[in-house]
Amino acid sequence: MNQLAQFDDSKLVLAVERARALLDDGDVTTARVLAGGAYEHAKAAAQFASRYAAVEELAGPLIKKARMLQGEALLIEAQAKIRLAAEWTVAQETGTGLKGRPKSVPDVEHLSVADTGLTRKEMHEARKLASAEQREPGIVERAIEARLSAGLEPSRANLRAAIGTDSATAAERGNNLYETPPEAMRTLLSLTRFAPNVWEPACGKGAISRMLEDVGYQVELSDLIDYSTADRHGEVQRVENFLASAPRCEDPGRPDIVTNPPYGTDLNAFVAHALRAHRPRRMALLLNLNFLCGFDDPDRCFAMDENPPSDVWVFTRRLPMMHRDGWDGPEASSRMNTAWFVWTLDEATGTYDADGKRGTQLVRVDWKTFQESTLIGPKESERGEPREDKPQTSGECPEAPLPEETHGPAGTAVIPSKRGRPRKAVPA
């Protein structure tokens, strides 16, 4: 039986048409609600059709039609929100807008957020949507049309991202430079030791490298962008694309890697290239906690499944906000959950998971705990001296010697435990 043939979208078409008519007639609140329902209905229809895309020829046309209706419903909903935001703005400017629940009914008519049918969060988003449309008239419709033209779903999340109401626009992000807060580095350098030579391949203006140098590491600097960042010896950073950097796996003196890689479309490739081409004995990356998830990107799977990290130190308390370079607006608290992902090469097997015998240890840490801790540098005997590694077979990369102990908060030492078991702190 043809299950797609049974799907009737006539009611969905009528709902979208009705929402448009209501908006044109000025019934903005009802139009928004109806358009929102039509959006969800169309989204479900496209998902329904996608389930049969491989076996039924009707799936393609239905997906396309459902997405067109979803896009139209999304446009109506957005336009309704923009009008409601405009009414609210006028009410605020004229003093007839209520910011909270009044204790008594006023003598004159006032407009509250509840009267618009939006929550306070939705009103905040609607006002940002209205501001974007005011700056660039037609931007909402163009963003939705761009998704449809590319054969992609026109979702609310993509609309927010496309017009910059959810985060900074691509133009605002510029070079995608978000300086790493010192709290993140203090935590990392309280928990582990690296080889004497460390490479910072996304060095930016030196937020990470300065702290590494302060505890005695020799730091190699590079970045896609020329920030003219120099190390403590005056050596200026290399300007290079990390994704195109030549492999260094066979170099016995290759450095460890510590960086806060640029987030975005190249993130998965960045991490995978580091593991494939350079195979550092130890690598620490500050990443969004969502990096733990995902299954359909080969590079993500290579980094998390085929070459899993030895440790993931999850910040229980969000780090101070990493504002983009050049930001001069009000500072906000971070909405992102982050963690240090640490890969440690196993010396005996030349793999990151000891041939499947070592899993990833996930530990919750609070960066405030390490504000007064003693930071770990390279061993005194290793500073500035070449490493002495055990002989290796072709294609294998030796492991950096693990520290005898790593230091936690002042007055304690965190003793490395067997994989999968909690660490314990003892007096130092």
Image (cartoon, rainbow, N blue to C red):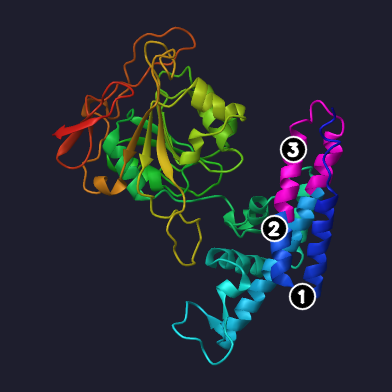
- Residue at the spot x=60%, y=31% of the render? 244
Q: Is residue 269 above or below residue 108?
A: above
Q: Is residue 368 magenta?
A: no
Number of the label disc, if any, that sits on residue 87: none
- Please provide percent x and percent y for residue 90: 63, 82
192 vs 84, nearest the viewer: 84
Cα distance in 3D space between marks 2 and 3: 18 Å
- Please provide percent x and percent y for residue 73: 76, 57
Residue topped by disc 1 = 26
Q: Main secondary structure of the magenta part?
A: helix
Q: Is residue 307 left or right of residue 389?
A: right
Q: Amino acid at mark 1?
A: Gly
Residue topped by disc 2 = 36
Residue 254 can be seen in this image: yes
308 vs 17, nearest the viewer: 17
Q: Is residue 398 above or below residue 254?
A: above
- Please provide percent x and percent y for residue 238: 51, 39
The secondary element bearing badge 1 is classed as: loop
Q: Amino acid at mark 3?
A: Phe
Number of the label disc, if any, that sits on residue 48: 3
Q: Amino acid at mark 2?
A: Gly
Give the residues in magenta: 38-67
Within 10 angstroms of label 1, few (less than 14), some, or many (20 or more) residues?
few
266 vs 326, nearest the viewer: 266
- Residue at the spot x=75%, y=68% of the render? 137
- Choose the circle earlier in sequence order: 2 or 3: 2
Q: Is residue 64 magenta?
A: yes
The secondary element bearing badge 3 is classed as: helix
Q: Is residue 342 above or below residue 132?
A: above
The secondary element bearing badge 2 is classed as: helix
